[in-house]
């Protein structure tokens, strides 16, 4: 009996196993098969050297056939496959060093009307004319005491003794003859007499025109501390504003920062500066090279800065004469401008006389008229030196240097 049961079990297993195996196979065969993912060879086309014997990169299709990349049926674009397996090297952009930007070139303020624009600054330091004199001349009774006060006011304004007496005599005569006390009429008379005494007939033009291809040469001289190098830079701006081509000569070789300071002023308006790299070089040789450069470049003006010096040092004063003689081997010096600090008043006259003896002064640059200076100093300076005031400085700004205009100057003196 047991044997029969064992036989039955064996028969059942023998029947069921094939059935179960068939069911499993049927299920497996009924599932959709995934397509085979194509694969790349060891190299892709980008890695091949030109002219290599190795063929182009290939892939195998789903049937196992090996095809060129360009013809193989892909489920993913070739470039994406390449990116997945062999990322292309990223080329870094070349580093370009930027050159430092050139300093911006400034456009100087127009020369015309500079003095008129700066009138208020001048008026503040010269209200003795607009207030004291007009008050005296418009009083009910103008007697000798009043005229004495008028004289004193003019002397305080640094007009000088001789010009003061001359002006008072003229005014006294006109007021007596016309018999007017009207403030506006008195102002008009004072204006006319001041214009006469400041002398509108003097030629105040700068010699800044080349002759026969030779540039006009200007030398700028003065004592220590008057702001001479700064003034030279401002004169350059005046010339550039008048469309002149300029070369600067840094012949102040004794003050270490002078050449650098002048070069900075020049660069601001696009003007080159001739300078020496040798400490305390011969100033005459620097001036000579500056003129030589100006001739070669056919510029309009060569503007030469010189070292400040004390008027009582004979050897230093003689050096100015040497600079001028050396320069004139190439071109005549058309202008020798003396820079005077207006705040020194009558003391500036002694300085001016010594410089006039060393070199032929052709014009005055009167600076710092916006401070404690008295505008009357213009008159005695012109009379004692016999040369005109050509430029006046009215502030610290780059364009606070103006050509001297007699009527505009007098109007500023009389401004309320």
Image (spheres, rainbow, N blue to C red):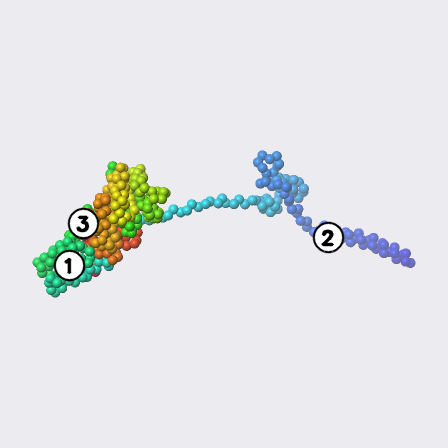
- Spatial CA distance of label 2 from label 3 is 128 Å
Split into 4 quadrants, where in the image is the N terminus? bottom right
Q: Which of 108 and 168 is in front in this view?
A: 168
**Mark 3 residue crowding within 10 angstroms, few (<14) / some (14–19) / many (20+):** few
Q: Position of residue 90 (x, y in %)?
A: 54, 45
- In which image quadrant can residue 244 be found? top left
Q: Which residue lies furthest to the bottom in this view?
A: 140
Which mark is in front, 1 or 2? 1
Residue at image point 22% right, 46% down: 356
Residue 137 is tagged as none
Which mark is in front, 2 or 3? 3
Residue at image point 62% right, 41% down: 43
Residue 27 is tagged as 2
Q: Which of 327 and 247 is in front in this view?
A: 327
Q: Residue furthest left?
A: 177
Residue ID for mark 3: 384
SS at circle 2: helix
Residue at image point 83% right, 55% down: 12
């Amino acid at each position: 009996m047991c044997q029969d049961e064992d036989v039955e079990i064996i028969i059942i297993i023998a029947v069921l196993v094939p059935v179960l195996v068939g069911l499993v196979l049927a299920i497996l065969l009924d599932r959709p098969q995934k397509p085979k993912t194509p694969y790349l060879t060891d190299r892709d086309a980008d890695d091949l050297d030109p002219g290599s014997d190795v063929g182009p990169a290939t892939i195998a299709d789903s049937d196992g056939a090996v095809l060129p990349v360009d013809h193989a049926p892909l489920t993913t674009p070739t470039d994406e496959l390449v990116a997945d397996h062999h990322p292309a090297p990223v080329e870094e952009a070349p580093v370009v060093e930027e050159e430092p930007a050139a300093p911006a070139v400034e456009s100087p303020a127009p020369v015309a009307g500079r003095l008129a624009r700066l009138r208020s600054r001048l008026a503040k330091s010269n209200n003795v004319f607009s207030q004291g004199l007009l008050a005296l001349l418009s009083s009910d009774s103008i007697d000798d005491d009043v005229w004495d006060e008028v004289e004193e006011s003019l002397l305080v304004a640094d007009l000088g003794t001789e010009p003061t007496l001359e002006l008072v005599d003229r005014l006294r005569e006109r007021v007596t003859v016309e018999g007017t006390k009207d403030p506006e009429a008195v102002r008009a008379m004072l204006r006319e007499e001041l214009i006469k005494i400041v002398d509108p007939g003097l030629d105040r033009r700068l010699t800044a025109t080349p002759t026969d291809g030779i540039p006009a040469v200007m030398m700028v001289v003065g004592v220590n501390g008057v702001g001479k190098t700064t003034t030279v830079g401002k004169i350059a701006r005046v010339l550039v504003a008048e469309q002149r081509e300029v070369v600067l000569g840094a012949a102040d070789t004794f003050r270490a920062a002078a050449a650098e300071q002048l070069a900075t002023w020049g660069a601001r308006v696009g003007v080159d500066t001739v300078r020496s790299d040798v400490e305390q070089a011969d100033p005459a040789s620097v001036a000579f090279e500056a003129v030589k450069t100006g001739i070669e470049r056919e510029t309009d003006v060569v503007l030469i800065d010189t070292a400040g010096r004390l008027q009582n040092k004979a050897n230093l004063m003689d050096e100015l004469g040497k600079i001028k003689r050396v320069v004139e081997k190439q071109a005549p010096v058309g202008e020798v401008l003396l820079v005077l600090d207006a705040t020194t008043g009558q003391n500036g006259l002694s300085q001016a006389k010594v410089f006039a003896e060393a070199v032929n002064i052709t014009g005055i640059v009167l600076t710092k008229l916006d401070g404690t200076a008295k505008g009357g100093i213009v008159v005695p300076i012109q009379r004692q030196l016999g040369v005109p005031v050509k430029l006046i400085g009215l502030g610290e700004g780059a364009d606070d240097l103006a050509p001297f205009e007699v009527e505009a100057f007098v109007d500023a003196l009389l401004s309320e």
